[in-house]
Amino acid sequence: MAVEGYRLEKIDDYRWRVPRIGPMLTDGLVFADAELIPHIERDKSLQQVANVACLPGIQGPSIAMPDIHWGYGFPIGGVAAFDLEEGVISPGGVGYDINCGVRLLRSEVTAQDLRPHLGKLMDLLYRNVPSGVGSSRSDLRLGVKQVTEVLLKGAAWAVKQGYGWAEDLERIEAGGRIEGAEPDYVSQRALERGRQQVGTLGSGNHFIEVGYVGEVYDEVAAAALGLAEGTVTAFIHSGSRGLGYQVCDDYLKTMLRASEKYGIVLQDRQLCAAPLPSDEARRYLGAMRGAANYAFCNRQMMAHWVRETFSEVLRQSAERLGLRLVYDVAHNIAKIETHKVDGREKQVCVHRKGATRAFPPGHSEVPATYRQVGQPIFIPGDMGRYSYVLVGTQGAYDETFGSTCHGAGRMMSRKQAKRVAKGRAIVRELEDRGILIRAASRATVDEEISEAYKDVKNVVEVVHHAGIGKMVAQLRPLGVLKG
Amino acid sequence: MGDAGWRWRTIEHTGDLGIEVEAPSLEQLFVAGAHALAGVLLGEEAGAAASEPVKATVWRELALEGPDREVLLVDWLRELLYVQISEDLVLVEAELGEVGESRVAGRVGFARPSAAGCVERELKAVTYHELEVSQRGEEWFARIVFDI
């Protein structure tokens, strides 16, 4: 049964505590301001924070970011770390879309110069990057052996095949390849689903967004990231597609049995888990890392086609256009990392479900080129407003296991969003505001209307003021490709 | 509701999409859940037993076992979702000979989505979250949340 009777106590302007009660083993810690709290309290996400706090071996609090909303099992926007001996790993704490994440390309092109070509660019992006329900590539069907290589090598596999530049790999979380992938622990069904979907966007909230740097807040960090006011950028938001969904599905069944076997009391079956030292956990970690590498490869290939499309439309090479990768970061993942717990450094398994890694300046896992300013973080908003670039901070490292928010956070259910969009021409409305939409499905556009999301500015300001992320720049959309 | 008088509807869920299903028997609840899955894939928001359903073009035998009827219902829907994803077939008919606490078995009829509509929605998975299968008076009830 879910934790009942939890309360919310204000700690300061940006922090709230869900005090430990009943089966909870620790407090919940929610990052939000007074404006966001009523949105958060509207659904069951705080109960999910409390439920996660009941899992064995949890270290520090059960953490919620300001973009938290009701997910399945774990809240979306949740962070939880577990002791490697006493703690657990839960596929529900990673999510179905393993290594769903965001990458950002920057350029030397100005928004003004791109504007006359924008329609053609969006049309060709729509043609060149498969998107929508069950999107697959008819021209690229990998053999099972190749999928296995993708699971092992991640983005490096794509670069070796000619999709992208060698320097890209230095600018991806974990170099685009998480160590310890075990393709043998990935089912045939998952491998089969992975054969035709590498290099595809998918549907739902996945997108490619062409935008520009609207405002810079931190000149030094923006310069280090190669972001200049008025220049064009491209976001790619996608994950591990059907392969990742299948890995999660397969291991939820395993973990449901494991929870019973190891006597783990579940507040919600979707939280099913296995002790980290167990064989079930080892197998899931191996499969999950493979799926994460598949996602890095997926975004790498799409970035290649984005570069090719810009190049075709603007009749200059991607190199001349300066279409360099800024960074690529996951927001659905579990990783073994070293953090300070109760004043002592130790290895823990950090689950980030709808939360972004936010490592500080000087950390060895931050690429050398960004080590002075911190790890880049991308917080996309909705398709009609703006998105943000931040960098990681020591505050995040000390307080949230090096994590921060990941997006605006839904405020309306998809059903409610469709009701609000009914009778309106959303694509036309956005076009009137200078934002071109290309989408495989009108239903997706309606479900993804701006009003369905919190204002990402409010979310980002909370993490900035709380010190778990530092604002660098605001990006504004010019064109959005939706699934 | 008559003997086959099941119905389903989508429910509000911030991050994902849920359905609630009602049926006069456990067997019909599983049939209704399968039709609800197909309906959600086709972009529908509610549905009920039809007097003239779309005819199946492909039939399969399916038998599953699970620890209880809730997990069994999730596994049943997962299998049907996998068929949709891997073979582009949606369920249009189901004849379940056996539905119990730990086993479901029967014949399942599929058709190309074009016969029933158009697949408008990608479902990532059928989750255990907020899962419920229960008997409420004369009726059976189920709630299932999909990840989308």
Image (spheres, grey):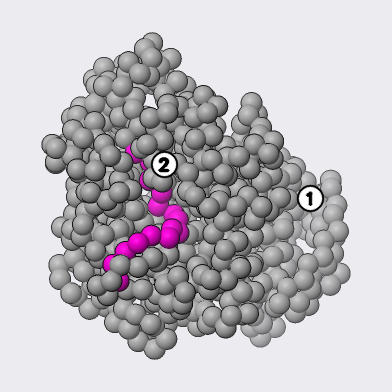
Look at the image and give the residue range highlighted in magenta.
A327-341
Q: Which quadrant of the structure image shows residue A107?
A: top left
Q: Which mark is residue A267?
A: none
Looking at the rendered structure, which numbered label has been put on residue A175? 2
Dot 1 and dot 2 residues touching (CB under 8 Å): no
* Residue A387 on image: x %, y %: 28, 42
Q: Residue drawn 49% across and 37% down? A: A155
Q: Chain of mark 1?
A: B
Whole-percent x, y for residue A389 in the image: 25, 43
Disc 2, SS: helix
Is A205 placed left or right of A39 in the picture?
right
Which residue is at a point 66% across and 85% down the rendered structure image? B137
Residue occupied by mark 1: B110
- In the rendered image, residue A438, in percent from the top left (x then y), is placed at 45, 31
Q: Please name the residue shown 73% across and 73% down the image.
A: B66
Height in image: A205 above or below A349? Answer: above
At label 2, counting other C-alpha atoms closer than 10 Å, the crowd grade (few under 14, some 14-19, many 20 or more) is many
